[in-house]
Image (cartoon, coloured by chain):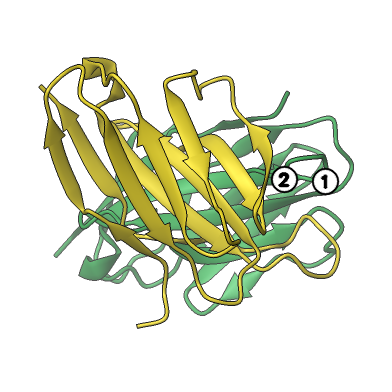
């Protein structure tokens, strides 16, 4: 079975500061992908960043970077220079290389950026 | 707009009624997924299609739920005899299956919020 754990129900960060959102995962598959999505209050899920299990370098995408520690099974999202528009729910998700290929999502972290 | 669209955006119904939602994926995407998201939780997988074939169904998809993608383009999700526990956001996503899994980013629609009274 696959599982995603996000232990921070809510996080606060000051505008322009960096913040790390935690994600740990559990899978027995060797090949898998890790995704982060942002869900603003409007409800749509916005793809942020992807990390493959065989990728040797941490993924980066603009102000987003993924701190991937495979041995610890963690894939933390780092947002640099936080902006007020970053206030949203953030979901970590995993897809493993198995039949079905559906995503398993974590419970999410609500990030609030303070002015 | 060439993103994933869902209709309706909101649906209020009485317990016991049937409801049907529609999802139009990104046109060239061959995979289509349905998820359910309850308040304060992450999305939970319901089912997915590759083209017109329904390849997997979650145990969450009781026999009151049925999904179709008849021509491999749009999809419908029907809930029969709705119950209050069906109240949730129903999200549709699509992806283009290419290259080596597991990378196939899913693009999500805005969701249909169902309220069962």
Q: Chain of mark 1?
A: A
What residue appears at the point 60 percent right and 61 percent down from the top-left corner?
B72
On screen, residue B61 versus residue B96, left or right, reads: left
A77 is higher (above) or lower (below) than B39:
below
Residue B28 figure quarter: bottom right
Q: CA distance from mark 2 to mark 1?
A: 6 Å
Label drawn at residue A101 = 2
Whether residue A80 can be seen here: yes
Question: Tag 1, which secondary structure?
Answer: loop
Which corner quadrant holds the C terminus of chain A?
bottom left
Whether residue B42 can be seen here: no
Label 2 with label 1: CB-CB less than 8 Å: yes
On screen, residue B26 versus residue A82, left or right, reads: right
Residue A104 figure quarter: top right
- Give the image location of residue A107, x and y in percent: 43, 33
- Residue in front for this viewpoint, A105 or B80: B80
Chain represented in yellow: B
Question: Tag 2, which secondary structure?
Answer: loop
What residue appears at the point 35 percent right and 29 percent down from the top-left corner?
B79
- Residue in front for this viewpoint, A41 or B2: B2
B58 is higher (above) or lower (below) than B55:
above
Which corner quadrant holds the N terminus of chain A?
top right
Q: Residues within 10 Å of mark 1 (few under 14, many from 20)?
A: some
Colour chain A appears in = green
On screen, residue B116 versus residue B112, left or right, reads: left
Label drawn at residue A97 = 1
- Residue in front for this viewpoint, B78 or A13: B78
Q: Chain of mark 2?
A: A
- Give the image location of residue A58, x and y in percent: 71, 65
């Amino acid at each position: 079975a696959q599982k995603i754990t996000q232990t921070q129900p809510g996080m606060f960060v000051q505008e322009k500061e960096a913040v790390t959102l935690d994600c740990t995962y559990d899978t027995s598959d060797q090949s898998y992908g890790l995704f982060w999505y942002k869900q603003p209050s409007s409800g749509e899920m916005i793809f942020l960043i992807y990390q493959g299990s065989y990728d040797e370098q941490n993924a980066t995408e603009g102000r987003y970077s993924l701190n991937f520690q495979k041995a610890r099974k963690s894939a933390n999202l780092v947002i640099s220079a936080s902006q007020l528009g970053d206030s949203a729910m953030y979901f970590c998700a995993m897809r493993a290389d198995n039949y079905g290929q559906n995503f398993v999502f974590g419970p999410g972290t609500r990030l609030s950026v303070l002015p | 707009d060439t993103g994933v669209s869902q209709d309706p955006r909101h649906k209020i119904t009485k317990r016991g009624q049937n409801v049907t939602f529609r999802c139009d994926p990104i046109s060239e995407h061959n995979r289509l997924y349905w998820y359910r998201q309850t308040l304060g939780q992450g999305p939970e997988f319901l089912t997915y299609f590759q083209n017109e074939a329904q390849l997997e169904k979650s145990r969450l998809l009781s026999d009151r739920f049925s999904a179709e993608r008849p021509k491999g383009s749009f999809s419908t999700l029907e809930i029969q005899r709705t119950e209050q526990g069906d109240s949730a956001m129903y999200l549709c996503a699509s992806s283009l299956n290419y290259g080596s899994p597991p990378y196939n980013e899913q693009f999500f629609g805005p969701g249909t919020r169902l309220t069962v009274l």
